[in-house]
Amino acid sequence: MTIQITEKRLKNLIQDSVAKTFDSKFMQFGALLLPYVSKKEQKEIEKLYKKPTRKVSKSYLLKA
């Protein structure tokens, strides 16, 4: 059984895959650069500015 795929289709598949991987890795890298916030400090922030909305377009779980 062989699968036939055009060169253009293969190129698009590879580009999409690489772009998704880069997006994911850059998001992880960006999350690592965020400063740590203690629970006490977070409570003070929420007291001053209210809780943030929980609307999220994308979320990532980082494994340390």
Image (tube, grey):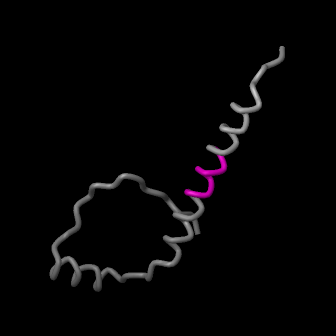
Question: In the image shown, does 34 or 42 lie closer to the viewer?
Answer: 34
Vertical placement of residue 7 versus 36, above or below: above
Which residue occupies the extreme right position in the image? 1
Image quadrant in which you'd find residue 28: bottom right
Image quadrant in which you'd find residue 24: bottom right
Residue under the image location 29 percent in, 85 percent down: 41
Magenta residues?
A: 17-23
Vertical placement of residue 50 versus 10, above or below: below
- Whether residue 55 is in magenta: the answer is no
Where residue 16 sits: x, y (%)? 62, 43
Where residue 11 sits: x, y (%)? 72, 38
Where residue 19 sits: x, y (%)? 61, 51
In the rendered image, which quarter contains the N terminus? top right
Residue under the image location 43 percent in, 82 percent down: 36
Vertical placement of residue 8 versus 48, above or below: above
In the rendered image, which quarter contains the C terminus? bottom right
Vertical placement of residue 45 versus 7, above or below: below
Residue under the image location 20 percent in, 77 percent down: 46
